[in-house]
């Protein structure tokens, strides 16, 4: 399997180890797999396979320059006892006709662990396979969850340095505590004055700053990314779509071959894009329903065909989705534009110069075949948390509530009775303030860990072991810088 840039020529393609190490293409595009639909999909066997077996199968398709033994080790180390559910990504019982795919049983309580337990192991192996003797500097912009999960995944991994930038005041108290509580000699987390888009844009600019990159190389360092722009993070996310399908067959909720919908709480478009790739590989997905919060640029895009980021940025109660520039959409566009890099170059240039672009009616029609979209306001998020808890005694986090609300709306409007899986991206204990506000109809005076304890006293159920670990964590002081001094800060950390 070869990888090429969405903005570059086919002849500049790389193998997967090289694409994982690079993270981002030097032309500003994203690496995408070439010709990946020729797989043998064992739909009838899925229901008997463990999560690890499905992961080995999917990773084997995309990372075929790694040996079977190497992938076996990566997968089994990544999905081991650090998960508090043996199934890794269990499907809940049905609530209101929907299944919730719980992706938050990893060490940092959000779905980012699914991929960020794999990526560091894959990257260390890639470095060996490629005989690369550079120190890899993982540079990451985070809206909260990626930062913690990358720090946790790369902690004390030799040959790597992790530098995380997050928006000051733009992450939840628990996320902040988790980030500042990670321990490891190779980890730094720094707040920047600005929002997530500012952080992500600045990080992309640093990736594309040739002279700064040269300075790193001269000192035996090399940048890579742990954002979902890295193919090594995206591909492991395909696995849970297959796993969810297998679980539905196992429960006899569907027969092999029956269509399923997935509703995905979306920010940077990595999670839902993995679903799109699963569909391309032959998984019978009918609709992918893209759920947004008040930063509903994607709802408008899927409705009108125009992407327009010129709008107010809202800090919401689903902060991991507070994004106006969804990077991975570029990969979807590349696919529906028949892999034409010139189309992507034009659209992305319009986005950076004018803040908007419109796709052709041809592309729009292709998107309509697979995608539906909707959004939930902060009030709707709270009422959805309360509705599901009151009706079913099942507590969901605000991001999952966005998807749950949108799925409910979709079902009512479209009369589509296809079984629906809601991708549940975080533990409710990661955002306890919002859960309490939703359940009690009034705000709590406490935040962070005390709020987790208050929430537990309301729910009165035992905490998962990874939530209990969080209660014992101690955090360092926060450090805030201006985005303009990010390069200086990186140089200082690396001592160059
Ligand atoms: C990252 C994240 C999302 C958004 O996922 P994308 O892949 O960026 O679309 C949704 N919910 C939670 C809890 C997250 O951490």
Image (spheres, grey):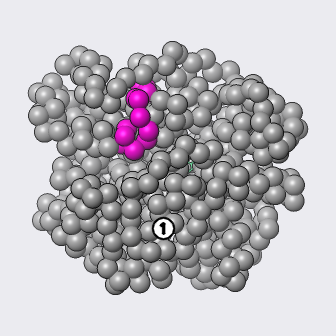
**From the viewer's perspective, is 460 left or right of 408?**
right
> Which part of the image, by quadrant, shows the N terminus?
bottom left
Q: How far across and down, in percent of the image, does residue 109 sit?
A: 62, 40
The answer to whether residue 114 of the structure is visible from this angle is no
Is ligand 1 less than 8 Å from the beta carbon at label 1? no
Q: Is residue 247 above or below residue 149?
A: below
Label 1: which secondary element: helix
Residue pictured at 67% horizontal, 39% vertical: 431
Image-quadrant location for residue 201: top left
Residue pictured at 29% horizontal, 76% vertical: 337
**From the viewer's perspective, is 133 left or right of 363?**
left
The answer to whether residue 447 of the structure is visible from this angle is yes
Q: How far across and down, in percent of the image, does residue 407 sit?
A: 66, 68
Which region shows up in magenta?
188-200
Image-quadrant location for residue 98: bottom right
Q: How far across and down, in percent of the image, does residue 385 sit?
A: 76, 52
**From the viewer's perspective, is 113 left or right of 235?**
right
Image-quadrant location for residue 287: bottom right
Q: Is residue 86 above or below residue 45?
A: above
Q: Is residue 194 magenta?
A: yes
Residue pictured at 17% horizontal, 62% vertical: 8
Q: How far across and down, in percent of the image, does residue 446 sit?
A: 74, 26
> Which part of the image, by quadrant, shows the C terminus?
top left
Q: Is residue 207 magenta?
A: no
- Between 266 and 23, the residue placed more toward the observer is 266
Residue pictured at 26% horizontal, 55% vertical: 352
Q: For mark 1, what is the residue?
A: 300
- Between 125 and 381, the residue placed more toward the observer is 381
Mark 1: few/some/many CA within 10 Å (<14, 14-19, 20+): some
Q: How many marks?
A: 1
């Amino acid at each position: 399997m070869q990888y090429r840039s969405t903005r570059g020529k086919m002849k500049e393609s790389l193998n997967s180890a090289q694409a994982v190490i690079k993270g981002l293409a030097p032309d500003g595009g994203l690496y995408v797999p070439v010709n990946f639909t020729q797989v043998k999909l064992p739909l009838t066997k899925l229901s008997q396979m463990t999560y690890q077996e499905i992961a080995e199968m999917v990773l084997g398709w995309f990372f075929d320059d790694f040996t079977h033994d190497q992938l076996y080790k990566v997968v089994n180390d990544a999905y081991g006892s650090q998960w508090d559910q043996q199934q890794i990504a269990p499907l809940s019982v049905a609530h209101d006709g929907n299944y919730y795919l719980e992706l938050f049983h990893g060490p940092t309580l959000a779905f980012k662990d699914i991929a960020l337990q794999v990526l560091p192991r894959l990257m260390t192996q890639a470095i060996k396979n490629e005989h690369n003797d550079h120190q890899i500097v993982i540079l990451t912009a985070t809206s909260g969850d990626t930062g913690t999960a990358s720090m946790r995944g790369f902690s004390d991994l030799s040959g790597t340095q992790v530098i995380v930038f997050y928006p000051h005041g733009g992450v939840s108290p628990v996320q902040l505590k988790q980030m500042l509580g990670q321990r490891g000699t190779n980890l730094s987390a720094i707040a920047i004055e600005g929002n997530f888009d500012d952080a992500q844009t600045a990080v992309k600019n640093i990736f594309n700053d040739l002279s700064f990159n040269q300075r790193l190389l001269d000192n035996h360092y090399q940048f890579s990314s742990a954002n979902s722009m890295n193919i090594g993070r995206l591909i492991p996310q395909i696995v849970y779509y297959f796993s969810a399908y297998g679980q539905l067959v196992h429960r006899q909720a569907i027969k092999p071959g029956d269509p399923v919908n997935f509703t995905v709480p979306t920010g940077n478009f990595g999670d839902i894009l993995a679903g799109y790739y699963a569909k391309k590989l032959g998984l019978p997905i009918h609709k992918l329903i893209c759920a947004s919060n008040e930063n509903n640029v994607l709802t408008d895009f899927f409705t009108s065909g125009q992407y327009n980021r010129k709008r107010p940025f809202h800090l919401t109660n689903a902060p991991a989705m507070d994004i106006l520039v969804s990077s991975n959409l570029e990969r979807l566009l590349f696919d529906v534009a028949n892999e034409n890099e010139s189309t992507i170059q034009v659209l992305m240039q319009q986005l950076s110069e004018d803040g908007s672009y419109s796709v052709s009616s041809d592309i729009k029609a292709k998107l309509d075949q697979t995608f539906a979209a909707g959004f939930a306001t902060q009030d709707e998020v709270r009422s959805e948390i309360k509705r599901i808890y009151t009706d079913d005694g099942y507590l969901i986090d605000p991001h999952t509530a966005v998807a749950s609300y949108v799925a409910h709306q979709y079902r009512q409007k479209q009369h589509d009775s296809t079984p629906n899986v809601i991708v549940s991206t975080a533990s409710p204990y990661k955002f306890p303030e919002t859960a309490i506000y939703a359940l009690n109809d009034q705000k709590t005076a406490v935040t962070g860990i005390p709020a987790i304890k208050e929430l537990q006293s309301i729910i009165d159920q035992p905490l998962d072991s990874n939530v209990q670990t969080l209660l014992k964590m101690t955090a360092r002081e926060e450090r805030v810088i201006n985005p303009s001094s990010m390069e200086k800060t990186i140089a200082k950390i690396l001592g160059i």
